[in-house]
Every structure is written in structure tokens, then in C-alpha cells.
Image (cartoon, grey):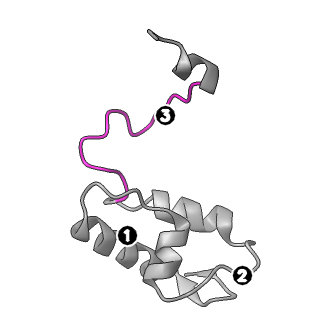
Amino acid sequence: MIVCHCQSISDRDIRAAVDWMRAADAETIITPGKIYHALGKRADCGGCMPLFLDTMRGCDSFHVPGEIARDRPPVLRSRALRSVGPK
């Protein structure tokens, strides 16, 4: 299935790029920009981004090995909370 019509990127292209990046570095953070770069392409209009992200996240090798909870989003703390501590 074509995910990005502007750049002719298919779901298979995205899966192959994710698998390749994970094999090259098991702990890398995979982003859409890195996938476009790995495919030698650049994002254009951005209309594909929701489907692109769903396809990317649906890959078996997308998550970093040892990640605690796949089905739970990461907990993000505000900067104020992170800066509290001994001085």
C-alpha cells in the first residue's frame, strides 16, 4: 500500500527501513525523518504523516528492545519537576 504519494513510499518501504535501522543499532530512536533519510527521500506535504506514523509504530522491530511498556505512552514530566533536586 502506498503511504506517501508525494514520495512514492509504501508500507513495505517503511517496514524495511525500520528493520534495517534496528539491525544497525538496536537502541536507536526511529523517527519519520530518519526513515525518509534512509530511503533517500524528503517529506513534502505531510498529509501522509498519520498513516506513516501508524505504519512505523506497527512494525515488529520498531520498539527499542527492553522497553518497559509497549502499550503505555512514556511519562513526560515538566521541566520544573525535572529541575527539582539537591543543589
| Dot 3 or dot 1, earlier in sequence | 1
Which residue position holds label 2? 44
Q: x and y percent of residue 77 in the render?
A: 57, 25
Which residue position holds label 3? 74
Which residue position holds label 1? 18
Q: Secondary structure at mark 3?
A: loop
Q: Amino acid at mark 2?
A: Asp
Q: Secondary structure at mark 1?
A: helix
Q: Amino acid at mark 1?
A: Val
* Mark 1: few/some/many CA within 10 Å (<14, 14-19, 20+): many
| Nearest to the observer: residue 19 or residue 79 | 79
**Is residue 12 highlighted in magenta?**
no
| Nearest to the observer: residue 31 or residue 85 | 85
**Is residue 65 highlighted in magenta?**
yes
Which residue is depicted at the point 63% across and 20% down? 80
* Mark 2: few/some/many CA within 10 Å (<14, 14-19, 20+): few
Which residue is depicted at the point 67% across and 86% down? 5
Which residue is depicted at the point 24% across and 70% down? 24
* Mark 3: few/some/many CA within 10 Å (<14, 14-19, 20+): few
Quarter-of-image position of residue 12: bottom left
> Can you tell which of label 2 and label 1 is closer to the viewer?
2
